[in-house]
């Protein structure tokens, strides 16, 4: 089980560091990590502990906790094992003067 949790942690670090730097994140990477989180819970890991660890990893990457970005009830909208991973919105500029 420790190997699964270590792999989840490694993937969170990779995802959140990339997103915080402005890079894109393929959806499959997030979805596979969510599957590992669910598997870890099925094998006995505490889902609340995984959520706390994910929030701590997010905080290290972004410099602020998920609560500051998504609000104090973020876990109600992103229920375990969902990872709230979003790429920054691309700037859009009009191509015509209209």
Image (cartoon, grey):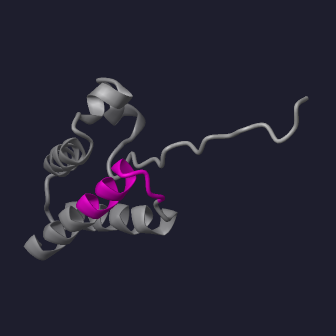
Q: Position of residue 86 (x, y in %)?
A: 46, 47
Magenta span:
12-24
In the displayed structure image, the side of residue 87 where residue 59 appears, left or right: left
Q: Quadrant of the C terminus?
A: top right
Q: What residue is at 27 percent from the left and 68 percent from the top? A: 39
Kindly give the residue lying farthest to the front in the view shown: 97
Q: Position of residue 3 (x, y in %)?
A: 12, 76
Q: Quadrant of the N terminus?
A: bottom left
Asked if residue 93 is among those painted magenta in the image, a careful observer would answer no
The image shows residue 56, relative to residue 30, as above or below, that is above
Q: What residue is at 48 percent from the left and 49 percent from the top? A: 87
In the displayed structure image, the side of residue 41 where residue 73 appears, left or right: right
Kindly give the residue lying farthest to the right in the view shown: 98
Q: Is residue 12 visible?
A: yes
Q: What residue is at 21 percent from the left and 60 percent from the top? A: 41
Q: What residue is at 61 percent from the left and 41 percent from the top? A: 91
- Decide which of 90, 85 is in the foreground and name it: 90
Q: What's the magenta bit mostly, secondary-structure-wise? A: helix
- Decide which of 75, 53 is in the foreground and name it: 53
């Amino acid at each position: 089980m420790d190997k699964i949790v270590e792999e989840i942690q490694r993937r969170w670090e990779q995802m959140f560091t990339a997103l915080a730097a402005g890079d894109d994140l393929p959806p499959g990477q997030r979805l596979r990590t969510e599957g590992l989180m669910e598997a870890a819970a099925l094998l006995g890991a505490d889902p609340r502990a995984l959520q706390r660890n994910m929030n701590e990893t997010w905080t290290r990457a972004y410099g602020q906790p998920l609560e500051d970005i998504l609000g104090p009830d973020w876990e109600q909208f992103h229920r375990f094992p969902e990872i709230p991973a979003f790429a920054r919105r691309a700037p859009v500029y009009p191509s015509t003067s209209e």
